[in-house]
Image (cartoon, rainbow, N blue to C red):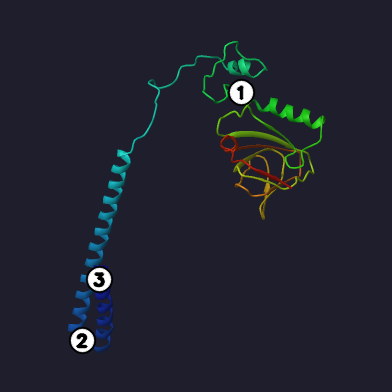
Amino acid sequence: MLIVALVLAVIGLAALVTAVVTSNELIAWVCIAASVVGVVLLIVDALRERSKGEASESAAEEADADEPEFAEDYPEAQQPVTAREGTSLARYGSNLAPLEPVTPFGRTSPIFSYPYARSREALATLAKNGDADACHGWKLQFINPQSGGPAMPTIGAFLQLLPQGMRTSPCRSTDSTVYSVAEGRGKAHIGEQSFSFEPRDTFVVPSWHPLTLEAGDECVLFSYSDRPAQQALGFWREQRG
């Protein structure tokens, strides 16, 4: 139908030109009729396509509705507060643990938050008592204090300190890593591209892309990746230098 409408439009245009040149009233009416028919056919075709699109969307929604899904909603509007702020940190985050092993969140760390000030202090202390790693500076991993493993079973979270003026050696690994800048300014060289960063910036290093970091100031970077999942499967690899 769309082709017919276009043909009629072309005929109408040609007839219009002829009518103007020859001053023929009959041809002018033919031009008008062909144009009207062409426009009507175009409208009908557009309505048919719209109807097909709505039918396809409806079918897709019905198909999605038939797919099994899992959801576990809390029965009340909000969950009750059963412990005061800082309870989990006091119970698990002070090199102590309850007498009876408790895993309130399964394999995920029972510590709900890791205060930045304490983590930052740990990095500063390391910086005073040893040399920086050539690829990472001083870098620590947030852990589950009950298992000593990562804070989450599939996602690893890290915090690293780079001294002012440091340029790290190239390093690449199989995990894809998201970086968030907590302190300092510098540059991230990812593969063949370079990006300047400053506090609150976020950048991503895709899997197996070499990363070199330049610290214009003393920098603190938070990062997370799928390293624990790859390590559990035996896939994770790192190449330094």
Residue at 29% x, 54% y: name it.
Answer: 53
The circle drawn on residue 147 is 1
Q: Amino acid at mark 2?
A: Asn
Relative horizontal placement of residue 81, taking residue 131 as reference (left or right): left
Residue at image mark 3:
5
Q: Mark 1 vs mark 2: give the one in front.
A: 1
Compare marks 3 and 1 and give the one earlier in the sequence: 3
Q: Amino acid at mark 1?
A: Ser
Distance of label 1 from label 2 (alpha carbons) = 94 Å
SS state under label 2: loop
Looking at the rendered structure, the secondary structure element under dot 3 is helix
Query: At 27% across and 61% down in the image, what residue appears?
Result: 46
- Based on the displayed image, in which of its 4 quarters is residue 182 positioned? top right
Q: CA distance from mark 3 to mark 2?
A: 24 Å
Cα separation, mark 3 vs mark 1, equals 72 Å
160 left or right of 60 in image:
right
> On the picture, is 189 further left or further right than 128?
left
Q: Left or right: where does residue 58 sit relative to residue 179?
A: left
Where's residue 186, x and y in %?
Answer: 72, 45
